[in-house]
């Protein structure tokens, strides 16, 4: 466990200011006292200490920054124990800041709070912001199409094992703030969905007896920002929330005072106030999140179905999101991603989205017009967040206004919409004409990057500003006239006027013409090729011009700050409109993908049916490696009397079993986000959870083998799936011995059928499982069709009714390039085993295989060892273990009991 209040990400840890080389025993200057004061206030952060045009770091902070950023490490003086220091230019600070935060460090920005030009002695300094992984707002640091969540977790009490955990999360860059109560069973799923960039926790509050709490600490420990438990005090946090939202009760947000989310949400708000050094006014409300209203997807399922990133390489390309996301705004892209990770469970909201998608689908010209306008809209959510946190510049405000200027056009396009959702969006789109006009009439067309550079405010906005600009502007004309008149008066043809920060404006004369300089000029500087002079007249005008320029910039800054303050009153209106724009964008994107990829509107209801005609895999059908995708039907029904509850799917490897079961799950998921689906027709009875177990992999960090990982995921499915769930399993049991795997697969199918009652697809290489369709009313067989021609076979990728007893493994091995002699030998062994297995003669198959021609061993060590006397052959006569197997009452045996029995039998047979 890391020390309290210490952020650790990807193994990196922020220095705590422990006395290092040249620490506090160095010179106690007033400036260094300011630094140590900042360090004491933020011991877990690196201090960026503003000194003129640089941010300097001292002590261990400097050592860390030098190592992480590759910048030069120096010392304040020549003493052996001198304070190490390193610095980065103010203008390029953002890039360095981002590298440190991505490396897992907190960074406290300690700014100069006074203008050095107007201050005698040392300027005041103070921390104006603490930047962490969860509080980043810089555009370059964030994925425009994904949320960056700061999450707070308040675990349930160990005294209340059936209680709820409190979760709250916010994207500081947009102001979207959510909270919910979640039980232990759903905690990891919610965290996996949120993928927190930073997680606020009080480690001592975790229940050591809770496997879920233990897992949270294992998986997310690197993202922890640890807080003391008292910072989650319920009453104090309730008051913090009421203070921030300026309300007397949280009931208006739909949150009860006794909700587990209150401590988490309050702790989140207080952390933001600490790090942002201001009230985040763009966080205007808490949006309660109810996990029971959404289809639940656990971590394994999100990964298996490759919804937002691929399993290999964690890429966006090749995911379902990549296929669907044709959004034209960043906020629309973020919302569509949210929809994919949290599909709906209730029929009415699903149908409402479908209606909006259908209207945009049926009217291609309307869809194109809407998407064209959306393409010009900037990220309203993140722009308004920058405004609220005081970090918006002139360009940001102009971008905001140019975007809000388009809202009336969007409203007009969906005016009179037939679908209820589009009509609602029309009402939620605030034209914001007053805000747009206020900004565009105040901010110049091409504002500079920094407000202090001047030129942000338009001419005509403020008379005093115009006058100061006129004086400063006239100064350039005067300078040109003065230069020309002095050159003519003195005869110095190459006379120049220049400026530097040491002594201001000067006249420069080349060495060859110094003799022509009049006596009233005052020499100020000698350089290699010229002499520089000043005159009383020049200095008098300089004072007037520079004073006007400085006053103009100060006045511009004040006018800009007043505008920003005025716009604060419009934040809620802009955020409401931004969310409506994002929703319209996401709906239009779904309609566009449906039109482009030939999707159909599915019928969604509360039945237990799942009927898909001509279903296709939405990602694979668009893959460059797929020439022609073969559609297939799916028909499941949770009613066992229909005989279609659980399909046992057998067939060759590489024939498309995994594609088929995944596409079924994806079509259900698409239907429940309100999208159209890749099929000829579909009827989907809503599901509450989708479970998948596809593929295999070790979890080295936990010391778990492939088979153990598989069994953990199977246990999760069997313990949490219900009659409304969809279960998709592929090749369960292949991580262990043949008989162990077959026994487990058999027992799992029975348990799903008898105890769970979920709709399920069970792809397997155990052909023996096809016998279950004769024993269990809801089990039926499917297989993948194959066309045989001599020794060659063709995979047809068509799913047909009925089972199969062949997997064509040797043919697949041939396609993979296995050496011919290995394939020949495998064919010999297979033929012998199949022939002898048919007769079940005791001991014969193994001995016959041993007698078959075999490759000559390379050396004696590689020669096969003789079978020990009494060793069991593959098909030995019935033993005591076999009799025990036959005697097991499968209906009364849990999967765990079955696993223990198999282990006992295995030990006795060894």
Image (tube, rainbow, N blue to C red):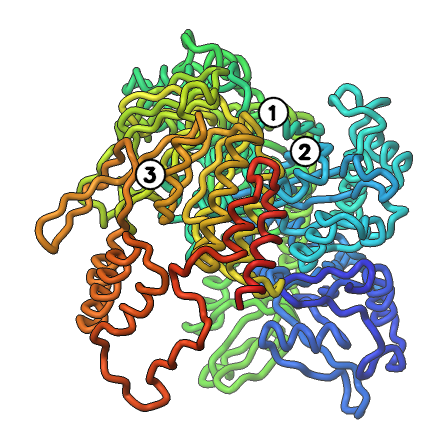
Q: Is residue 627 above or below residue 130?
A: above
Whichever of labels 1 and 3 marks the residue nearer the N terminus, that label is: 1
Q: Are marks 1 and 2 in contact (CB under 8 Å)?
A: no
Q: Is residue 439 above or below residue 264?
A: above
Disc 3 versus disc 2: distance between alpha carbons? 36 Å
Of the 4 image quadrants, the one containing the N terminus is: bottom right
Please indicate whether residue 430 sits to the left or right of residue 184 in the image: left
Q: Are marks 1 and 3 in contact (CB under 8 Å)?
A: no
Judging by the rendered image, the residue that carries numbered circle 2 is 178
Judging by the rendered image, the residue that carries numbered circle 3 is 660
Q: Is residue 26 above or below residue 457?
A: below
SS type, badge 1: helix
Mark nearer the viewer, 3 or 2: 3
Q: Residues within 10 Å of mark 1 (few under 14, many from 20)?
A: few
Whichever of labels 1 and 2 marks the residue nearer the N terminus, that label is: 2
SS type, badge 2: strand
SS type, badge 3: helix
Judging by the rendered image, the residue that carries numbered circle 1 is 293
Disc 1 versus disc 3: distance between alpha carbons? 28 Å
Q: Residues within 10 Å of mark 2 (few under 14, many from 20)?
A: some
């Amino acid at each position: 466990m890391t020390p309290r209040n210490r952020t650790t990400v990807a193994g990196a840890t922020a220095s705590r200011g422990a006395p290092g080389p040249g620490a506090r025993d160095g010179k106690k200057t007033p400036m260094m006292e300011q630094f140590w004061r900042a360090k004491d206030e933020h011991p877990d952060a690196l201090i960026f200490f503003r000194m003129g045009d640089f941010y300097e770091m001292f002590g261990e902070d400097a050592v860390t920054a030098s190592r992480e950023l590759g910048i030069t490490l120096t010392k304040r003086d020549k003493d052996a124990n001198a304070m190490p220091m390193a610095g980065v230019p103010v203008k390029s600070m953002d890039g360095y800041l981002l590298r440190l935060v991505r490396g897992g460090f907190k960074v406290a920005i300690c700014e100069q709070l006074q203008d050095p030009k107007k201050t005698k002695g040392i300027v005041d300094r103070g921390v104006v912001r603490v930047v962490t992984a969860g509080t980043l707002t810089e555009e370059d640091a964030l994925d425009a199409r994904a949320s960056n969540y700061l999450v707070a977790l308040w675990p349930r009490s160990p005294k209340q094992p059936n209680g709820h955990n409190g979760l709250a999360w916010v994207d500081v860059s947009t102001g979207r703030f959510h909270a919910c109560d979640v039980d232990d069973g759903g905690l990891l799923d919610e965290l996996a969905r949120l993928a927190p960039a930073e997680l606020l926790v009080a480690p001592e509050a975790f229940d050591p007896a809770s496997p879920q709490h233990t897992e949270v600490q294992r998986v997310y420990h690197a993202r922890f920002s640890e807080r003391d438990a008292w910072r989650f005090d319920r009453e104090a946090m309730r008051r913090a929330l009421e203070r921030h939202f300026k309300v007397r009760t949280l009931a208006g947000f739909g949150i009860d005072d006794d909700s587990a989310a209150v401590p988490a949400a309050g702790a989140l708000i207080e952390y933001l106030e600490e790090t942002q050094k201001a009230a985040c006014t763009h966080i205007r409300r808490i949006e309660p999140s109810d996990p029971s209203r959404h289809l639940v997807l656990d971590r394994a399922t999100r990964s298996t179905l490759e919804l937002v990133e691929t399993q290999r390489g964690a890429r966006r390309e090749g995911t379902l999101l990549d296929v669907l996301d044709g959004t034209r705004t960043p906020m629309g892209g973020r919302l569509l991603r949210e929809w994919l990770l949290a599909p709906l469970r209730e029929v009415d909201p699903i149908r409402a989205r479908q209606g909006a998608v259908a209207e945009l689908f049926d009217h291609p010209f309307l869809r194109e017009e809407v998407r064209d306008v959306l393409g010009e809209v900037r990220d309203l959510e993140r722009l308004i967040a920058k405004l609220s946190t005081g970090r918006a510049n002139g360009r940001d405000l102009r971008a905001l206004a140019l975007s809000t200027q388009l809202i009336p056009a969007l409203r007009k396009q969906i005016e009179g919409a037939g679908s209820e959702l589009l009509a609602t969006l029309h009402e939620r789109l605030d034209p914001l004409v007053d805000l747009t006009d206020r900004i565009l009439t105040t901010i110049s067309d091409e504002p500079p990057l920094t407000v202090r550079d001047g030129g942000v405010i338009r001419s005509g906005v403020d008379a005093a500003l115009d006058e100061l600009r006129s004086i400063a502007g006239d100064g350039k004309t005067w300078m040109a006239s003065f230069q020309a008149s002095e050159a003519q008066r003195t005869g110095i043809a190459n006379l120049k006027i220049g400026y530097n920060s040491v002594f201001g404006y000067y006249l420069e004369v080349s060495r060859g013409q110094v003799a022509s300089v009049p006596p009233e000029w005052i020499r100020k500087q000698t350089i290699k090729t010229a002499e520089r002079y000043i005159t009383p007249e020049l200095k008098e005008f300089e004072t007037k011009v520079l004073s006007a320029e400085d006053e103009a910039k100060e006045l511009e800054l004040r006018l800009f700050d007043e505008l920003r303050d005025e716009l604060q009153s419009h934040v809620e209106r802009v955020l409401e409109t931004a969310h409506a724009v994002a929703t319209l964008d996401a709906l239009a994107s779904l309609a566009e993908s449906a039109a482009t990829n030939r999707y159909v509107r599915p019928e969604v209801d509360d039945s237990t049916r799942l009927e898909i005609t001509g279903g296709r895999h939405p990602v694979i059908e668009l893959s460059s490696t797929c020439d022609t995708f073969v559609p297939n039907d799916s028909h499941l029904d949770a009613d066992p009397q229909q005989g279609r509850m659980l399909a046992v799917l057998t067939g060759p490897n590489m024939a498309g079993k995994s594609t088929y079961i995944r596409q079924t799950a994806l079509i259900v998921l698409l239907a429940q986000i309100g999208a159209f689906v890749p099929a000829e027709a579909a009827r989907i009875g809503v599901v509450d959870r989708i479970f998948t177990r596809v593929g295999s992999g070790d979890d080295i960090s936990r010391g778990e083998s492939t088979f153990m990982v598989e069994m953990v995921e199977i246990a999760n499915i069997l313990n949490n799936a219900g009659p409304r769930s969809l279960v998709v399993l592929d090749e369960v049991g292949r991580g262990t011995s043949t008989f162990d795997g077959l026994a487990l697969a058999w027992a799992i199918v029975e348990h799903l059928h008898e105890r769970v009652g979920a709709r399920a697809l069970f792809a397997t290489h155990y052909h023996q499982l096809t016998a279950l369709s004769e024993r269990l009313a809801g089990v039926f067989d499917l297989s993948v069709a194959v066309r045989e021609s001599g020794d060659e076979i063709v995979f047809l990728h068509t799913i047909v009714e009925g089972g199969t007893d062949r997997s064509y493994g040797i043919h697949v091995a041939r396609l993979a390039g296995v050496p011919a002699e290995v394939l020949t030998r495998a064919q010999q062994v297979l033929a012998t085993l199949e022939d002898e297995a048919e007769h079940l003669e005791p001991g014969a198959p193994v001995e016959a295989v041993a007698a078959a021609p075999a490759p000559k061993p390379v050396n004696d060590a590689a020669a096969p060892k003789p079978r020990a006397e009494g060793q069991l052959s593959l098909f030995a006569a019935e033993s005591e273990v076999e009799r025990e197997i036959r005697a097991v009452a499968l209906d009364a045996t849990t999967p765990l009991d079955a696993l223990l029995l198999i282990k006992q039998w295995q030990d006795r047979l060894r």
